[in-house]
Image (cartoon, rainbow, N blue to C red):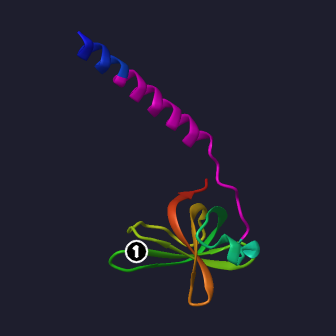
Amino acid sequence: MKDKILFKAALTFAIVGILILFVIVENTKIDEKSINNLTDDDVEKSIRILGEITNVRQTKSATFLQVSQKNNIDVVLFELKNFSAGKKVEIVGKVEEYDHAYQIIANKISIME
């Protein structure tokens, strides 16, 4: 009898916990950042940018985009996806420094319509 009560309590708390995590994730919004305003303080932080794809290059394991606002920034996505120049995109990812320049390691790229 105690096992059934303990199981029901554990299941209830697990479901409530998952729902709370879902609400937190849905309400957590990453601030939009301008490419021009990136600093060393942004390295290793997650950001969101809006821009236009100006160049696309793929290797066997990654897709490399050059995204433009007023300036350009390189974006690396470690997946093979088809993108084309001229498309407006929203990118969420982490700022990294590579070869003395900032780049974004993308977690999510959405085509803006």
Q: At 71% across and 74% down in the image, what residue appears?
A: 38
Judge left or right: residue 93 versus residue 9.
right
Q: At 56% across and 90% down in the image, what residue appears?
A: 99
Quadrant location, the N terminus: top left
| Predominant SS of the magenta segment | helix
Residue 68 at x, y percent in the picture:
67, 74
* Residue projecting furthest to the top: 1
Residue type at tag 1: Ala
Nearest the camera: 34 or 89?
34
Residue 16 on the magenta segment: yes
Nearest the camera: 5 or 73?
5
* Residue projecting furthest to the bottom: 99
Residue 77 at x, y percent in the picture:
46, 69
Residue 73's image quarter? Answer: bottom right
Dot 1 alpha-carbon crowd within 10 angstroms: few under 14, some 14 to 19, many 20 or more? some
Judge left or right: residue 75 versus residue 6.
right
**SS type, badge 1:** loop
Judge left or right: residue 86 versus residue 106.
right
Residue 34 at x, y percent in the picture:
73, 68
Range shown magenta: 10-34
Q: At 71% across and 72% down in the image, what residue appears?
A: 69
Residue 95 at x, y percent in the picture:
59, 71
Question: Compared to 92, does 20 lie above or below?
Answer: above
Residue 103's image quarter? Answer: bottom right
Judge left or right: residue 15 versus residue 35.
left
Residue 29 on the magenta segment: yes
Residue placed under numbered mark 1 in the picture: 62
Question: Compared to 94, does 7 lie above or below?
Answer: above
